[in-house]
Amino acid sequence: MSKMFVKTGDTVQVLSGKSKGMRGEVIAVSPKEGKVIVKKVNLVTKHVKPRKMGDQGGLIQVESALYASKVQLVCPKCGKATRVGHKNGKRVCKQENCGNEF
């Protein structure tokens, strides 16, 4: 498996799908599957069954995993979604006139 270009805590923008254009923080990364979970993005409705006496069941909304290729890292300096470059072991912004390190 290849190394992931996003890490937990990074801000990303969704490139395609029903959540296209939304931005959020990466909650979890799964390099083995090549997927990420982004806060308040790609919400799905889940049916929850009450487990104990007195618990309430119902419908809840949870974040679902996205393929990492569908998201792009957002540069904190210029605020644009950008490809990730590498310089001296650091991740850098590939936008013109930026070159900010992440």
Image (cartoon, helix red, strand yellow):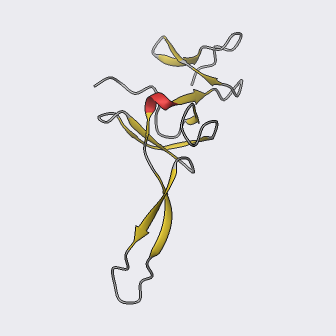
Which residue corresponds to the image point at 57% horizontal and 34% vertical from the top-left?
Answer: 12
Q: Residue at x 65, y 14 (%)?
A: 95
Q: In the picture shown, does residue 77 fall above or below 55?
A: above
Residue 68's place in the image compared with 42, above or below, is above
In percent of width and height, residue 96 lies at 69, 10
- Pick the front one: 55 or 4: 55
Q: Where is residue 2 in the image (x, y as percent from the top left)?
A: 32, 23
Q: How many marks?
A: 0
Question: Viewer-proximal residue, 21 or 27?
Answer: 21
Q: In which quarter of the image is the C terminus?
A: top right
Instruction: Give residue 73's quadrant in the image.
Output: top right
Report the quarter where the N terminus lies: top left
Q: In this rendering, is residue 25 above or below 82? A: below
15 sits left or right of 7 in the view: right
- Residue at image position (59%, 20%) is 101
x%, y% of residue 35?
A: 39, 37
The residue under the point 58% across, 42% down is 19
Residue lying farthest front? 18
Give coordinates of residue 52: x percent, y percent: 34, 84
Placement of 91 over or under 16, stated as above or below: above
- Res 5 → quadrant: top left
Residue sitting at the far bottom: 53
